[in-house]
Amino acid sequence: MKKKLVASLLVMSMAFGMVACGNSKSDDKKSEDGKTAISVVAAQYGQNTSDWWDNFVKDFNKDNPDIDLSVEVVSWNDISSVIDTRISGGKEPDILNIDVFADYQADDLLLPIQDVVSEETYNKMYPAFLEQSEIDGTVWAIPDLASARAMYYNKDILDAAGVEVPTTWDELKAACEKIKETNPDVYPWGIDMTTDEGQAAFAYYTWNNGGGFVDEDGEWALNSDANVEAVEYEIGLVKDGLTNEKPATETRYDLQDLFGAGKLAMVIAPNSLPTYCADGGYEVNYGVASIPTNSGTSVSAGVMDRFMCFDHDYSDEQIEAIKTFFDYFYDDARYSEWVLMEGFLPATQSGAEAMVEADPSQESWISILDSCKFYPTAKAEWADVKKGVIDVEQRALDGEDVKTLLDELQTTIAGE
Amino acid sequence: MYTKKLTTKQIILKILLYFVVIDICIFTLYPYFAMFCSALKSRAEIFSVNGTILPVEPMWSNFIDVWKRAPLAQYAINSLLIAGGSTLLAMLCGIPAAYALSRMKFKGKTAFLGFVIVSQMFAPVVLVIGIYKVMAVLGFTDSIVGLIFVNAAFNQAFTIWLLRGTFMSISPEMEQAATIDGCTRIQALIRILLPVAAPGIVTTLIFIFINAWNEYTVALTLISTDTSKPLTVGINIFNGYNMIEWQYLFAASLFAILPVVILFMGIEKNLTSGLTAGGVKG
Amino acid sequence: MNKKKFRKVEPYIWMAPSMILMGIFIIIPIFVILRMSLSKVTRAGIVKEFTGFDNFLKVIHTSAFPMVLKNTVVWTIVVVGLSTLLGFILALILNNKFKGRKIARAIIVFPWATTLVIQASVWKFIINTDYGTLNTLLKTLGIIEKNINWTPTAGAYFAWEIACGIFVTIPFVCFTVLSGLQSIDSTLYEAATVDGCNYWQKLFKITIPLVKPQLTISTILNIIYVFNSFPIIWTMTKGDPASKTDTIVTYLYKLAFYNGKKGEAAAVSVIGFLILLVCSSVYMISVLRKEED
């Protein structure tokens, strides 16, 4: 009996001891053989990402003998849970490449990015992009790449149905009906409202109806009339049978494959779709156009990923090493290789110039980037809003009232 | 007359048995057949609207390319180390516990058996946050050894419960006789009890090995160096942001199943042989 | 230490390795989660001040939570129930002597030897309306002419997920039971035959009572594993649409890592734990009681 008591006490005290220890940041960056160690966790964009980073690390460590760089590539599916778990364990990397930053900033985990990026490299960035990573006048992250969305259409299907490329919502609906009439086997229009990226669909329709996530003052405005109309239009397309059958469970990858296979007539997709089709061996005769709009001007959706630097009480040497890393990464030749590798768009002016020089057809995309809208990822409630709008879309699809749902969401978000 | 009738009945039963077994096997293998065919197709063919069951032009090169695209051999070795190590450790800790629980009388026995089960009740997807904290303190992050400990701990419940059941179904007389002859308890356990308990032990081994071989959540969070990743995490390389490379993912997965099936076939005969040993002496 | 004293301590020494292993790698992490569930946790996962039962109250008042609970119960009962039944029958079949039994057994291991993420991906792939291999197969065989939408509703998708869950759980039950069947003394059956028992009498009087320990443990563990199972639902639907295919585990994963509410997610996991504890302890206590008699 006594033994048991002692044993359980032992386990308990160990438990609490360890929990207490776990909180203290015991992360000492002792460098091996006098080298300064830097650790990077990077997101895996595609099949070339790992190889690219492998070579990067080799070159970097050769060119900088006093720095020991290590890069871990993690798939998009898992990266946020991996990072959050490591933060709980006090073992976050020095540099992180991911889509969002506000949550880390809110916990004072990040260093202002200007502290760890050289003046020269910092000035390469598009100012509009840097603004997206600004909270309280400080920029916390720099963009590593961007992508923009546009409407892709299957020329053969549209020709067969005898429809022009739609530019407005009314034209879009009419075109879809016509396509469905002439070719009932194809889906006229693709929508993805899954947990994966349902917020993108919400953005496409609300932005192109004069609405959106926030109002002019940057306050949440989720239940505006424009938004209600936009979501109702979106849901209406599904209900009329003009879209893929299961928008709540078919992700944009499914849609891209359907498009590549000639089963989907039109879809909003990132600028990497041509690379996707080419790599997949699809032979589809497609064209690109701006996203159909209901407000006169078409708004494209931009997505941007970032680098950020965790605060580990760095020594001057370490700060220098991190600066060296960023300078090396954003070196124009290396950077355009990075961007082109998976068919993304550059976030630096010199990168854009290099890209257009290599491939003039990219120029239209670069100009689209200038007029894009971005998700309000700098706002603290963004994660809730993202999940909230996806939930609204899915429940509306199920027959619930859009206005009521959006009102509820607005109350929850603004009330928090 | 009577015997003849019985044989007809037996023949019908035998045919029926084969019929059922073959049906079950076909049904079980269907997903693997689908995987295999898809692994031989190009991406465009996989998603083609008018697809065929078999690939039009089998791309056998997919099965070779997949080895160049990812260090699968290294991943497989890691998986073997993790699964093998976990199995060994789980057995080393589990057998003595199961032995004590089946052969000795002491206070807290029931409580301990309950505790073992209760310890399994937290969902691993959440528990991994806590596990990571422990590993950070012990310096086991990014270490295969750490993963072995976790897998062994996760499998204690099954090990202890199943082995305890097996030990209890075996009469303790033989061991008692051996102890009187001067054997220690440990000798009696190893020389007498374990051989008789072989079917239960083999089942436990297979179970732990497969579980550890397939473990994903903890390995994903714990291991950061590419060369230490097990297969489950490693093949994620084909699961990119821009596209999932089904043909490679499936090819690699088929390779990943092989070691387990081979191990199983090698060890399977013990499922029966142990029984005869026990049956004759019982 | 004298012999009598040693006898008293001995069992604990035998159990010590196992206890230490579980203590460090399971029990301590559980305490970490318990603490999170009772504290305010930032989005990035840093535990702040103690907030009592706030997280629990928030979770319970979420509109989707009752549905998620219901899904979890349906998922667990159906998957465990059917896979136990089918796995048991399969074990009876595989316990017969026949040519090719070794191969048949190896084939049955396949679903178990496959990582769940991959298994679920394949199933998703098979039942896809547009390029799924099931439609292709049925079209080639001439059974259907047009592609069938196998998952027109959330309920249908959930049913497929359950089917996949059963498919991967059967081998575990089958081999656990098989190990029990193999150790039954065959003379028992011979004696029963002499006494004039038919097949069903032998099944219920001899087989089932003797494999009961194996059946018990596989059922208890299955309830726990299936209740906490994550990859199948996550890979196939991520709980979409609108949490209609969510179980507690996928729901809390989204809460924790998509929505940044780690405190609430920890609370959900504690609620799940308590449900499991209550359900299985009823079962366990009755089993252990009988054994002790």
Image (tube, coloured by chain):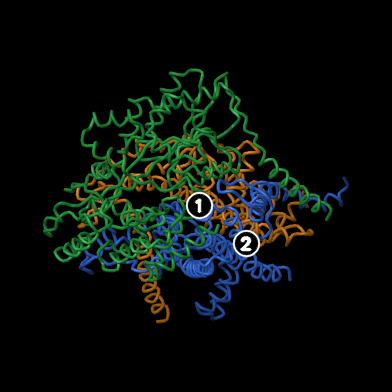
Residue B51 visible (yes or no): no
Which quadrant of the rendered structure holds the N terminus of chain C? top right
- Tell me the chain of label 2: C
Residue A105: image location, x then y, percent: 54, 41
Mark 1: amino acid:
Glu
In the figure, is residue B206 to the left or right of C162?
right
Write down the residue under mark 2: C56
Residue C54: image location, x then y, percent: 64, 60
Question: From the viewer's perspective, is residue A10 above or below residue C291?
Answer: above
Residue A335: image location, x then y, percent: 35, 29
Which chain shows up in orange? B
Which color has been applied to chain A in this rendered view? green
Extreme residue toward the right, this view: C2
Count of marks placed on residues: 2
In the figure, is residue A416 to the left or right of A273?
right
Q: Secondary structure at mark 1?
A: loop
Q: Nearer the viewer, residue B37 or C203?
A: B37
Question: From the viewer's perspective, is residue B190 above or below residue A230?
Answer: above
Q: Secondary structure at mark 2?
A: helix
Q: Nearer the viewer, residue B239 or B16?
A: B239
Q: Are marks 1 and 2 in contact (CB under 8 Å)?
A: no
Which quadrant of the rendered structure holds the C terminus of chain C? bottom right
Q: Quadrant of residue C218?
A: bottom right
Which color has been applied to chain C in this rendered view? blue
Residue C45: image location, x then y, percent: 58, 47
Between disc 1 and disc 2, the foreground one is 1
Write down the residue under mark 1: A381
Question: From the viewer's perspective, is residue C286 above or below residue A91?
Answer: below
Spatial CA distance of label 1 from label 2 is 21 Å
Mark 2: amino acid:
Phe
Question: From the viewer's perspective, is residue C130 above or below residue C10?
Answer: below
Q: Nearer the viewer, residue B21 or A333?
A: A333
